[in-house]
Amino acid sequence: MLTKENIFSILSEIPDPEIPVITIVELGVVRNVNIIDEKNIEVTITPTYSGCPAMKQMEDDVRKKLSEQGFQNINIKMVYSPPWTTDWLSTEAKLKLQKYGIAPPEESTTDKSFLTGKHKAITCPRCKSKNTQMVSQFGSTACKALYKCLDCLEAFDYFKCI
């Protein structure tokens, strides 16, 4: 039987184009699935941030994956409200990021301490030290900041709280 859960399961096989260890479902980009009939489906997605270059690839991946499952008419609906937040990252996704070498968001987006310029100590994903320092507000992508661990001396990306 065709259900939303089946479709979410299919979509959970699609890796994020920029961080292939997590899926677009774990990332929280896939917001909703509306099954119109056995051949027609609508998938609602939210970009991680305005202008995210990976969104076109995500749309293409969703279309391809669902076409392979026999869907003929796939409508991708992009919604911007409410805006995507790192609070939507699953716990499993955060653990996968850490194992991959990217520090996951450590606080909720309700914490606005960054507005005062006082950055919290971010845990190094390699040695787990909190003796870290921000090198740049921007890392390998705009949604990440570049940090350096002052203990193991490794540079790492931190997935910003958005």
Image: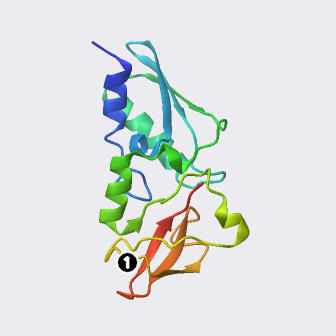
Q: Position of residue 140 (x, y in %)?
A: 50, 71
Query: Does residue 104 sit above or below 62 in this rendering?
Result: below
Q: Residue at x 32, y 75 (%)?
A: 126
Image quarter in which the N terminus is found: top left
Q: Residue at x 42, y 22 (%)?
A: 72
Q: Is residue 70 visible?
A: no
Asked whether 23 or 124 is in front, the reply is 124
Q: Which colouring convention does the figure follow? A: rainbow
Asked whether 116 or 26 is in front, the reply is 116
Q: Which residue is mark 1?
A: 129
Q: Position of residue 113 (x, y in %)?
A: 65, 63
Q: Is residue 78 left or right of residue 64?
A: right
Q: Position of residue 135 (x, y in %)?
A: 56, 82
Q: Position of residue 30 (x, y in %)?
A: 48, 36
Q: How many numbered badges does the structure rendering display? A: 1
The part of the image, by quadrant, that contains residue 40 is: top left
Image quarter in which the C terminus is found: bottom right
Asked whether 11 or 86 is in front, the reply is 86
Q: Is residue 22 visible?
A: yes
Q: Residue at x 29, y 64 (%)?
A: 99
Query: Does residue 4 sit above or below 46 in this rendering?
Result: above
